[in-house]
Amino acid sequence: MNRDEAKRILDKLEFHYTPKHGSWLNMAEIELSVLNRQCLKRRIPNQDTLKLEIAAWEEERNQKSDSVNWRFTTADARIKLKRLYPSIQT
């Protein structure tokens, strides 16, 4: 592969950095759940109204700067995931 080809491919890529704590997929699932509970749990008559409602919800959510509050601690993980880690006998 030559340099121009590599540059062409690189220009198509878009990097998204994942959070330090927690999975980006978990965060996406949480946001979709919040969207469903706060905005979509009712009949919406058409696609245009749906787009407007979601945009308004998104704007308010971003204004609040809400974030995910992770409650699964390292201690919890050691208990729940104990079977996945080998036991070291001393």
Image (cartoon, helix red, strand yellow):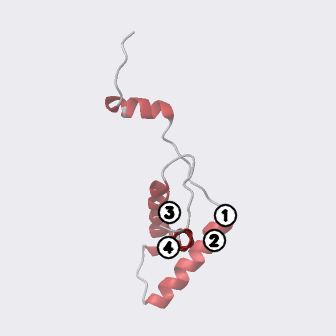
Q: Which residue is mark 2?
A: 60
The residue carrying mark 1 is 64
Q: Which residue is mark 3?
A: 31
Q: Amino acid at mark 2?
A: Glu
- As measured in the structure, the alpha-carbon distance from the residue carrying label 4 to the one carrying label 1 is 16 Å
| Label 3 vs 2, first from the N-terminus | 3
Q: Disc 1 and disc 3: Cα gap in Å?
A: 14 Å
Q: Look at the picture and state if 87 lies above or below 39.
A: above
Marks 4 and 3, how far apart at CA: 11 Å
N-term-proximal mark, 4 vs 3? 3
Residue in the image at 42% along x and 89% along y: 45
Give the residue pinned by disc 4: 39
Q: Quadrant of residue 15?
A: bottom right
Secondary structure category for the residue under label 3: helix
Q: Nearer the viewer, mark 1 or mark 3?
A: 3
Residue 43 on image: x %, y %: 40, 81
Q: Position of residue 76 (x, y in %)?
A: 45, 33
